[in-house]
Image (spheres, grey):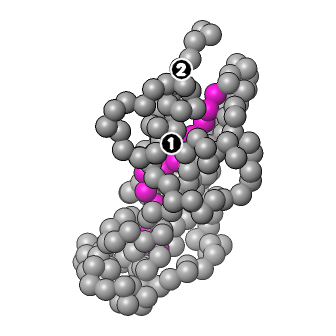
Amino acid sequence: KPQPFFLWLSFPEPHNPFQVSEPYFDMFPPESLPPLQSSKEDAVHKGFKYRWMREQWENAIPDFENIIDRTRSNYLGMLRLIDDQVSRFLTYLDYNNLRDNTIIIFTSDHGDFCGEYGLIRKGPDLPEALCRIPLIFSGPGIPARGEETDAHVSLVDLLQTICEATGASIPKGVQGRSLWPLLKN
């Protein structure tokens, strides 16, 4: 129908227990993964919370050290699964001539250690691996840039941004700020 719509398209993955079906399970073999940027030894220097979290995993899963690469592999497979599903959605928008009049926001709620510091999932502190998540905007009035920005933004800014982009009024008492001026330039 030719009326505006709002769609929240949410994927539960990537999430524990880090299982993914074929062909995604074999898409990123553990032995082909790039090296981690940190190790479990680096966690010692990060303080008690990191050491404690690692000990919890080692106590819960005796073979924890040996599952990290397979977990990373599955995590990447889950990300690719999401990429493919987003592609299907964008193809649908294109097929129905909706893409040119649709603002698309792609984001996540948090990151994952994915082996960094010898950890998986989320946990202690707010390191880059957990906080620096994708936030991608596309649509009318948003020029393509193809580059990242170092602006400090937050998911709390999304409501105000959507309101300004669509001409809707921003409800009173809402936190954050509109990112629309940043996106238009």
* Local crowd size for mark 1, using a 10 Å CA cut-off: few (<14), some (14–19), many (≥20): many
Place of residue 66 in the rendered image (x, y in percent of width and height, measured from the top left): 44, 78
User: For the magenta stretch, what is the residue range?
Assistant: 102-115
Q: Compared with residue 163, is residue 32 higher up or lower down, i.e. above or below? A: below
Label 2 vs 1, first from the N-terminus: 2
Q: Compared with residue 12, is residue 76 higher up or lower down, i.e. above or below? A: below
Q: Name the residue tied to disc 2.
A: 5
The kind of secondary structure element at disc 2 is: loop
Q: Are marks 2 and 1 in contact (CB under 8 Å)?
A: no
Q: Residue furthest top?
A: 1
Query: Which residue is drawn at the image coordinates 48% and 68% (left, top)?
Result: 129
Residue 139 visible in the shown view? yes
Chief secondary structure of the magenta portion:
loop
The kind of secondary structure element at disc 1 is: loop
Which quarter shows the N terminus? top right
Place of residue 62 in the rendered image (x, y in percent of width and height, measured from the top left): 30, 78
Tell me the mark number nearer the camera, choosing from 2 and 1. 1
Query: Which residue is drawn at the image coordinates 45% and 63% (left, top)?
Result: 131
Residue 62 visible in the shown view? no
**Residue type marked 2:** Phe
Q: Name the residue tied to disc 1.
A: 178
Q: Compared with residue 168, is residue 151 higher up or lower down, i.e. above or below? A: below
Judge left or right: residue 9 versus residue 26: left
